[in-house]
Amino acid sequence: MVLVNAAIGIVQLILSLVFAVIALYIGFAVLSRITKGIDVERELANGNVAVGILIAAVFFAIALVVQSGIAGISAGLSSALAVGVFSVGGVVMIGTAILQLVLGIVLAVIAIYIALNVLDKLTKGIEEFEEIKKGNVAVAVMMAGVIIAVAVILQSGVIGITNGLI
C-alpha cells in the first residue's frame, strides 16, 4: 500500500507540474494579447515594474485556480482507488478530475479577461494599459488586486465543481 500511495503522489506531482506550466504559458499568452499594444516581453526587458506586477498577478491568480484543480485530481485519484483505477468508474473519476482542472484553467483566463475589461469600463478616465506601458505602478497594483480578487472568488467555484463532480 505504501508503494501505491507513493506512486499516486508521483503521478499527482507530475500532473501538477504539467498543468502548472501549461496554465502559466496560456496565462502569459492571453495577457500578451489583451494588453492592448504593449510588448510585454520588451517592457519586462526594459525594467517596467508595472508590467511585472501585472504578470505576477496573472501568474498568482492562475496558480490559485490550478491549485484547487489539482486538489480535485487528488480527490479523483483517491475515489478511483476505492473502486479500482482501471475500472470504468475509476477511469471516469480520473477523467472528470482532469476535465475539471482544465475547466478551471479556462475559467480563470476568461474571468481575468472579463475582470480587466469591466475594470476598463468602470474607470473611464484612466487608460489602464497606457498607464501600465508608462510604468504606472499604482494602476498596476489596482489591476493586480482585481485579478487576484477574481481568482480567489473563482477558486471557490472550482472547489465547488470538484465537490459536485467527485
Image (tube, helix red, strand yellow):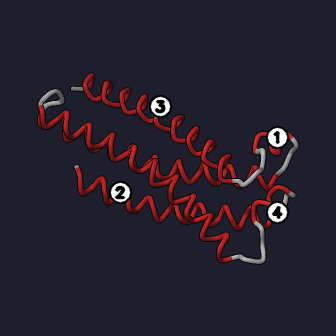
- Mark 1 vs mark 3, foreground winner is 1
Please report the residue visible at 41 percent of the width from the left and 32 percent of the height from the top.
Answer: 15
User: In the rendering, at what x and y percent does residue 58 appear?
Assistant: 61, 52
Q: Which residue is mark 1?
A: 42
Sequence-first disc among 4 and 3: 3
Taking the image as drawn, is residue 73 in sight?
Answer: no
Sequence-first disc among 2 and 4: 4
Q: Nearer the viewer, residue 111 or 93?
A: 111
- Mark 4 vs mark 3, foreground winner is 4
Q: Which residue is mark 2?
A: 159
Pointer 3 local density, CA inside 10 Å: few below 14, some 14–19, many at least 20: few
Q: Which residue is mark 3?
A: 18
Side of 112 where 71 appears, left or right:
left
Sequence-first disc among 2 and 3: 3
- Residue 131, disc: 4
Q: Looking at the image, which residue sits at the far front?
A: 37
Side of 26 where 125 appears, left or right:
right
